[in-house]
Image (spheres, grey):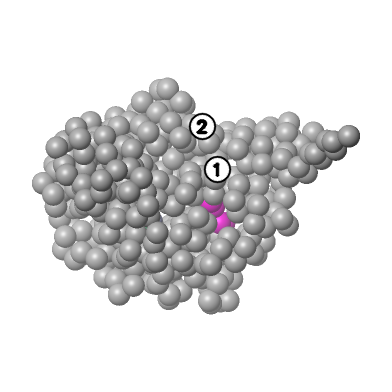
Amino acid sequence: MAQASSPDPRSPLRALLRRMPKAELHLHIEGSLEPELIFRLAARNGVTLPYASVDALRAAYAFTDLQSFLDLYYAGASVLLQEQDFFDMAWAYFERAAADNVVRAELFFDPQTHTERGVPIEAVIGGLADACARAHAEFGIESALILCFLRHLSEDEAFATLEAALPHRAHFIGVGLDSSERGHPPEKFARVFARAGELGLHRVAHAGEEGPAAYIETALDLLQVQRIDHGVRCTESPALVQRLARTRVPLTVCPLSNVRLCVYPDLAAHPLPALLDAGLCVTINSDDPAYFGGYVVQNYLELFDAHPALTVQHARQLAANSFEASFASASRKACWLRELDAVVARMTA
Ligand code: HPA
Ligand code: ZN
């Protein structure tokens, strides 16, 4: 007689990872552009792509480092021309986020990638802000926009971008720093981050993804950032790990991104579980999900698969950290924590 297969002892944990409410805090909206949508927008806008098909484009997603990814990421974004394109891109993300039980999303956007192609900044921000409003109305997802400066460009260009965005100040809550990290240390942007602080904007920066642990320290000390994006190379400095544990300055970690960009050979080698156990406010995020093999729940699932020692309590702590690390109000955070604990209690009873 055929043996009935025994139930997977990890499946209740996998269900919890899907079902629990969570915040996503490190998501480049241009990195959510799936190949199918790239082709649809290219056709709509009369843009010619150097790939014959969706499959040919997807086949090119074999990255060796951050720069090899960024080259394709900027090429993909070249199909975005009209306000409607930015709306459609963000709406597609929110549909995925709703399916992953994301209740708060803080979205990075790169205005310079678009303004340098002649796209008006109001088309960029207008389309994204409309999608954010509709996501709240239809899915109850609370969201916010964070304007990122491209660090391979100059600080003067960052200043010009900030000035151009100020008429739309109501639609973004903070500034960030992304693109090629090595050779572009945080101090290059110290003055524009100081200006952002004067304007009452939140400040975050990518640091310690490919760059050294020292970039995490200078982002904290010279840019006064409230969160570090990635930050995984803090492991190279025990003193910095201790500082991050003590201050609970959050790290927005992106496990699948780190493997796809060859920061780690595989998820089993990823330091997130050790950082969590050391008391850091680490969070799980998807970075550029269309390019790196999955949205936020996929990041949770694959990380937990690769680390059998991770438990329900770790899952709860990661979701709680995502709320703690968000820029939402204290009352919203308290409300999501209560929902989280209710879901954990129900699913582990
Ligand atoms: N790192 C730096 N810049 C980026 C990334 C990233 O992972 N994704 C989009 N821009
Ligand atoms: Zn990123």
Instruction: Give the farthest residue toward the left.
Output: 118
Magenta range is 279-284
The residue indicated by pointer 2 is 99
Q: Residue at x 24, y 36 (%)?
A: 41
The residue indicated by pointer 1 is 297
In which quadrant of the rendered view does residue 48 lie? Answer: top left
Q: Amino acid at mark 2?
A: Ala
Give the structural element (helix, strand or loop) at label 1: helix
User: Where is 23 relative to 257, above or below?
Assistant: above
Report the quarter where the C terminus lies: top right
Instruction: Give the farthest residue toward the top.
Output: 138
Q: Position of residue 307 (x, y in %)?
A: 67, 57
Q: Residue at x 41, y 69 (%)?
A: 210
Q: Is residue 47 left or right of residue 286?
A: left
Q: Give the spatial CA distance, label 2 vs label 1.
A: 9 Å
Q: Residues within 10 Å of mark 1 (few under 14, many from 20)?
A: many
Is residue 224 at all visible to an observer of this figure?
A: no
Counting labels gives 2
